[in-house]
Amino acid sequence: MKRITDALINFCRWPVAVFLLFSIPALLRSYQHFNFFMPHFYFLGTGIIFFWVTALSAGREMRSQIQTIAHELTHTLFAFLTLHLVKRVRLNPDGSGGSMAFSGQGNWLITLAPYFFPLFAFLYMLIMPWLLQISDNYWLVYAVFGYFVAYYWETVLSQIHTEQTDLIKEGYIFSGIIIVALNLFVNGAIFAFTGHLWHGIQLYSHMVWRLNIAHWYWLQDLFS
């Protein structure tokens, strides 16, 4: 079954990339629809600022080790989601990175997932609605979310460079399109979640789709 899954995902490689490239204008326009002056965004920003303050004071080696753990666990999650048996996950003892191994050929989703999927923020999002129900300090719940969001931003930015083997494997052009477009969507989804939790992500996805359709009609009118 994993062979069929890999074949389908890899077959859709460039159709997905072209669709995401086409979607970038709609994704950028979608940010205009957020009300960043809501109190929830102030609390989110507090957590983001707190992360950067603590990150600057933390040791570079410790930050790198945690980022590597998140990186390899994200590879592992997407290998599992695409029906692969994960054989091992390990960190290099010299702190130079890590690796994971799985059965089968693999696909580009497994390879590039750490560069657009906010693992720790996503796990926190799963319990955040419950935390908001039981907590008297809802501002703190959003601040912790902001901390994980900032961690995701730093992890992605620190691990994108020309010597990154994942990007070399999938190609710089393809990787660039996927990473840019999906990060735009993921960050929009994070902002939508901040405002209206999971229902906000549903609304945001519909809005991006409508903006894409509007963009398509605009291009048709432009070249007709």
Image (cartoon, rainbow, N blue to C red):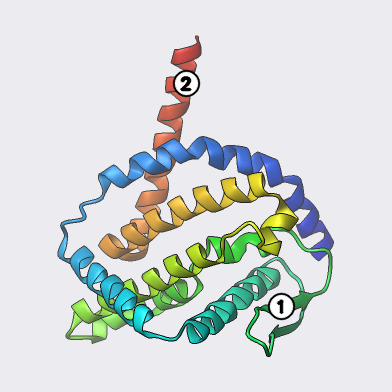
Quadrant position of residue 196: bottom left
Query: Dots 1 and 2: beta carbons under 8 Å?
Result: no
- Camera-nearest residue between 38 and 93: 93
**Three-letter amino acid code of the residue under disc 1:** Ser
Q: Which percent across, then down, holds residue 221?
A: 44, 14
- Marks 1 and 2, the one that precedes in the sequence: 1
Q: Which mark is residue 99?
A: 1
Quick one: SS at disc 1? strand
Q: Which mark is residue 219?
A: 2
Task: Name the residue located 76 percent from the left edge and 58 percent from the top edge.
Answer: 5
Q: Which percent across, then down, holds residue 132?
A: 26, 79
**Three-letter amino acid code of the residue under disc 2:** Leu
Quadrant position of residue 215: top left
- Residue 1 appears in view: no
Of tags 1 and 2, which is closer to the observer?
1
Quadrant position of residue 72: bottom right
Q: Which percent across, then down, holds residue 210?
A: 40, 37
- Residue 92 appears in view: yes
Against 51, residue 62 (above or below) is below
In the drawing, does residue 62 fall left or right of residue 45? right
Rounded to the nearest whole Å, what is the CA distance between mark 1 and mark 2? 44 Å
Task: Name the residue located 84 percent from the left edge and 68 percent from the top edge.
Answer: 104
- Camera-nearest residue between 58 and 139: 58
Count the marks: how many? 2
Badge 2 crowding class, 10 Å Cα cut-off, few under 14, some 14 to 19, many 20 or more, is few
The N terminus: image quadrant: bottom right
In the drawing, does residue 157 fall left or right of residue 101? left
